[in-house]
Image (spheres, grey):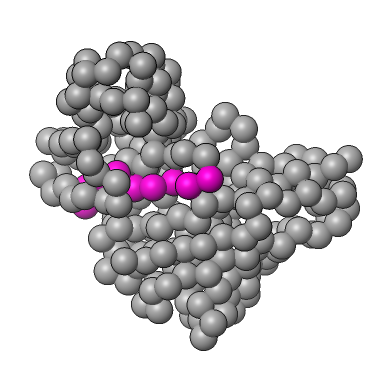
Amino acid sequence: GENVEQHPSTLSVQEGDSAVIKCTYSDSASNYFPWYKQELGKRPQLIIDIRSNVGEKKDQRIAVTLNKTAKHFSLHITETQPEDSAVYFCAASPYTGRRALTFGSGTRLQVQP
Amino acid sequence: EAQVTQNPRYLITVTGKKLTVTCSQNMNHEYMSWYRQDPGLGLRQIYYSMNVEVTDKGDVPEGYKVSRKEKRNFPLILESPSPNQTSLYFCASSLSGQPGQPQHFGDGTRLSIL
């Protein structure tokens, strides 16, 4: 089955700096890669996703890049703000769709004011 | 309001006492899933359901049961809970189980098994 590895497990940046979180996946047939943000005590919420026919996608201060050859994808947050502090999860969707998402282990991002 | 509703939100119970966590969605979604979240391990899938009466094991199904008698409901059953099932549980749903379908999560249920 699919295996998703996520790095780093914790990340601390100064407000205004950029943050990058990286994930690798094992199943070359995976074709959907969402990112979820989970604030303390809250549910995971989808913040951005990318499909395998696209190399990069942006939404205001966040962007995701995908390298299918290397089987890795990354989340980029620019001009970080304290409210970006949360746990971020990447995920990959196996081709068969029977197990819609396999998640990475999460990255705790702390934005220092 | 479109939502996934879990109950209870918090539960402290003892080893061996059967419990059920309910999950209900009002979006007419075909696909529903249960995850457990443990520190450092992310979200791991327990069971999922592609549609009514269609359920299958995820990555960590041991000690759990599910049923899908109606499209909107997908209860998680712990027949004989043990302390290693102490965790934060999330129910999620999506329009279908096909790749590319965003999943909507409930607010979570924190279970403590003593």
Above or below residue A61? Residue A73 is below
Quadrant in the rendering for residue B87: top left
Q: Going 78% across and 49% down the picture, which residue do you hit?
A: A12
Determine if the magenta segment contains residue B14: no
| Residue span colored magenta | B40-51
Residue B3 lies, in percent from the top left, at 41, 34
Residue B52 lies, in percent from the top left, at 14, 44
Any part of residue B39 in sight: yes
Q: Nearer the viewer, residue B100 or A112?
A: A112
Q: Going 33% across and 14% down the picture, which residue do you hit?
A: B13
Q: Going 35% across and 20% down the picture, which residue do you hit?
A: B113
- Left or right: B55, with B23 as reference point: left
Task: Tell me the quarter of the image containing the N terminus of chain A.
Answer: bottom left
Q: Nearer the viewer, residue B18 or B94?
A: B18
- Left or right: A60, with A37 as reference point: right
Determine if the magenta segment contains residue B48: yes
Any part of residue B33 in sight: no
Above or below residue B50? Residue B81 is above
- Left or right: A111, with B17 as reference point: right
Task: Tell me the quarter of the image containing the C terminus of chain A.
Answer: top right
Q: Going 57% across and 80% down the picture, which residue do you hit?
A: A67
Quadrant in the rendering for residue B63: top left
**Farthest residue toward the bottom?**
A69
Residue A72 lies, in percent from the top left, at 55, 74
Above or below residue A75? Residue B15 is above
Q: Nearer the viewer, residue A60 or B85?
A: B85
What main secondary structure does the magenta stretch of the protein show?
strand
